[in-house]
Image (cartoon, rainbow, N blue to C red):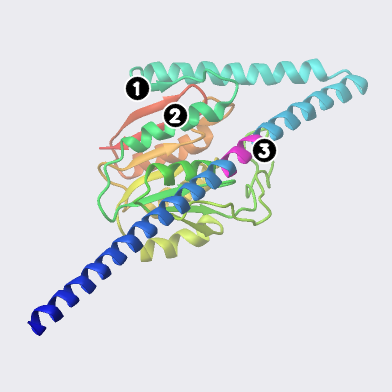
Amino acid sequence: MKILDATKTLLDELNLLREEVHNLRNENITLYNELTRQNKTLCEQILSLREQNAELCNALNKQHLAMSDELLTLFGGKSAVTQTLRIYLRELAGMQTAQFIVDKMPTVKAFENKSADCFVVAEEYLRYVLSQVNAGADDLFLEFGVFAGRSITLSAWAMPDKIIYGFDSFEGLPENFRYDWAKGSFDMRGVEPIVPDNVRLIKGWFNETLPPFVKTHPQKCAYIHVDCDLYSSTKTIFDNLKHQIGAGTIIAFDEYFNYPGWQEYEYKAFMEFVEENDIDFEYIARTDYEQAAVRIK
């Protein structure tokens, strides 16, 4: 009888312990969900602030151009000529790009800009491109040109179970880009942006940071986002990753075409890589702004 009573007591205590463990587990789950919700809210607030900052920068840029035109009008009357040349350059780039689309990607999925904010269509385009990635467990996700972290944050949210590596000096362009972006543009003063937990930022110039990275990360590249603008920087990417780019690798370009001189930048570096390494590829998406994405066959 005493043994039965002792056994019953032990069972009661065990049940109490199980109930306490169950309650603690529920509390932990609730706490985890609340922290996740707060983190998501914070990230959304950060993204919203970035959008507001981008809008402010665009507005200030427009004011700057307007003031420049006014000054040119006051001191020499060259405003009309400058503005006209700007228009002609953009129209020429647009016609060249339109012909390129007809010749090279007539049926590719297109994302049209239906608002004044070019970032909206770029985000829709990136979500689609990321949905096309078929990655192995250890395949690499890389972004070159992080700036304020907008696109890499989007990639991290779209691929929460993957580590996204972001490369940037955070000191701006190392040389002039096009006719309208000077050396040092996009300078973050060396300050890295706040990014999701599954992002790893690698600070420095590509030619210095990429070689050691490749040695320690020899896996295949599943996804590469090229947002570094320059021919030299893009060439550095392909020179270092050529043995890790293979069938199924998806490459998204942020400045592929549709601006004056586009044939001399990211596009040129990619075409050289394709020719030198006998690469076959297909276009999978584009925007009506400057972005295009390819899949390596």
| Rendered location of residue 56, percent (x, y) | 71, 33
Disc 3 marks a residue whose amino acid type is Asn
| Rendered location of residue 137, percent (x, y) | 26, 54
Which residue is identified by label 3?
Answer: 53
For the point 14% across and 74% down, which residue is it? 8
How far is the residue under mark 1 from the one under mark 2? 15 Å
Disc 1 marks a residue whose amino acid type is Val
> Does the magenta-highlighted stretch encompass residue 48?
yes
Regarding mark 2 in the picture, which secondary structure is present there? helix
Q: Is residue 228 visible?
A: no
Q: Name, please, the residue furthest toward the front.
A: 1
Q: Which residues, given as a range, are shown in magenta?
A: 46-53
Query: Pointers 2 and 3 in contact (CB under 8 A)?
Result: no
Instruction: Find residue 76 and name its label.
Output: none
Which residue is identified by label 2?
Answer: 124
Task: From this view, report whether residue 43 is shown above or below residue 81.
Answer: below
Regarding mark 3 in the picture, which secondary structure is present there? helix
Q: Name, please, the residue furthest toward the left.
A: 1
Q: Main secondary structure of the magenta part?
A: helix
Which residue is identified by label 1?
Answer: 108
> Does the magenta-highlighted stretch encompass residue 128?
no
Q: Nearer the viewer, residue 28 or 268?
A: 28
Q: Left or right: 166 with respect to 26?
A: right
For the point 78% across and 17% down, which residue is it? 81
Q: Nearer the viewer, residue 53 or 294?
A: 53
Q: Name, please, the residue furthest toward the bottom.
A: 2
For the point 79% across and 30% down, which residue is it? 64
Q: Nearer the N terminus, badge 2 or badge 3?
A: 3
